[in-house]
Amino acid sequence: MIAENAKNIKKIIDSANVTIVTVTKTQSIERIREAVNAGLTVLGENRVQEAAEKIGPLADLPVEWHLIGHLQTNKVKQAVAMFSLIQSVDSLKLALEINRQAAAANKQQDILLQINVAGEASKFGIAPSQASIVAAELFALPNIRLCGIMTIAPFFDQAKDTRPVFRQAREIFERLNKELGRPEYFNRLSMGMTHDYLVALEEGSNMVRIGSGIFGERQTR
């Protein structure tokens, strides 16, 4: 099932130069290996602790790990050591700690700025009105590299209803790209999940985060 799901999703996405981030939350080592063997080599975890339990046993695989869930400041040191991209940087305070820990590790940490486009109280992220100000401050930090933005759309029964959120996110991304003037690496627009990634692709996403579309409905650990 995993291999077939991966094949179907890659058929849709591969021609569009889009990165599939395979969401491995609650998945076993064996199931993750199956996904990687099917060609899915960018893995996303929501929690630092759960990622730590998987990265070691899967160290033989040619994969990169992204953090896609909320990051607490007391977990930053671990996150910097484990993840090639932290997608969920949702405050300047968090970014400053990432910069500090990355400096200590002699690393430049790639990050995305999470923007709460829909303004949902239940979601983390910078308000759209603050995006330019915060992005400029992040750009000045020497040990992080701001590579783009990430957003999570509200869940709607009809995926098409997410379109205005994704469109606004793309507009913010394009504006920041011009303001910051570094398109060679400020080039990642992470939006869209299993339920709504097709709409996100239509609105310009070049990175989608897919879990149940690959593994089936989430299993408890």
Image: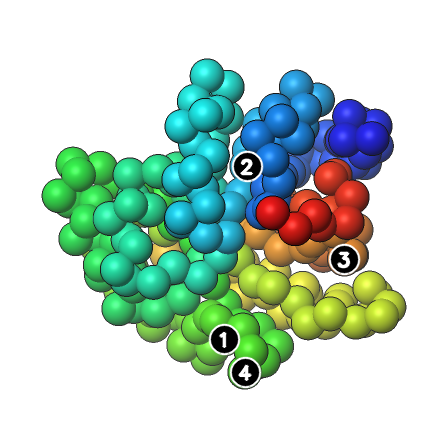
The residue wearing badge 1 is 128
Q: Earlier in the sequence, mark 4 or mark 1?
A: 4
Lateral position of residue 44 relative to residue 22, left or right: left
Which of pointers 2 and 1 indicates the residue nearer the eye? 2
Residue drawn at point x = 86 percent, y = 68 percent: 158
Amino acid under label 2? Leu
The residue nearer to you, when weighing 193 against 56, is 56
Q: Which labelled disc corresponds to residue 22? A: none
Residue drawn at point x = 40 percent, y = 28 percent: 56
Residue drawn at point x = 53 percent, y = 43 percent: 44
10 Å crowding of disc 1: few (<14), some (14-19), many (20+)? some
Lateral position of residue 92 relative to residue 54, left or right: left
Which of pointers 4 and 1 indicates the residue nearer the eye? 4
Amino acid under label 1? Pro
Amino acid under label 3? Asp
User: In terms of secondary structure, where does tag 4 sit?
Assistant: loop
Q: Earlier in the sequence, mark 4 or mark 3?
A: 4
Distance between mark 2 and mark 3 Cα atoms: 19 Å
CB within 8 Å, label 4 to label 3: no
Amino acid under label 4? Ala
CB within 8 Å, label 2 to label 1: no
Lateral position of residue 18 relative to residue 178, left or right: right
10 Å crowding of disc 2: few (<14), some (14-19), many (20+)? many
How far across and how far down the image is residue 148, in percent?
46, 52
Count numbered badges in the picture: 4
Q: Is residue 215 visible?
A: yes
Q: Which labelled disc corresponds to residue 196? A: 3
The residue wearing badge 4 is 121
How far across and how far down the image is residue 103, in percent?
15, 44
Distance between mark 2 and mark 1 Cα atoms: 27 Å
Lateral position of residue 141 relative to residue 202, left or right: left
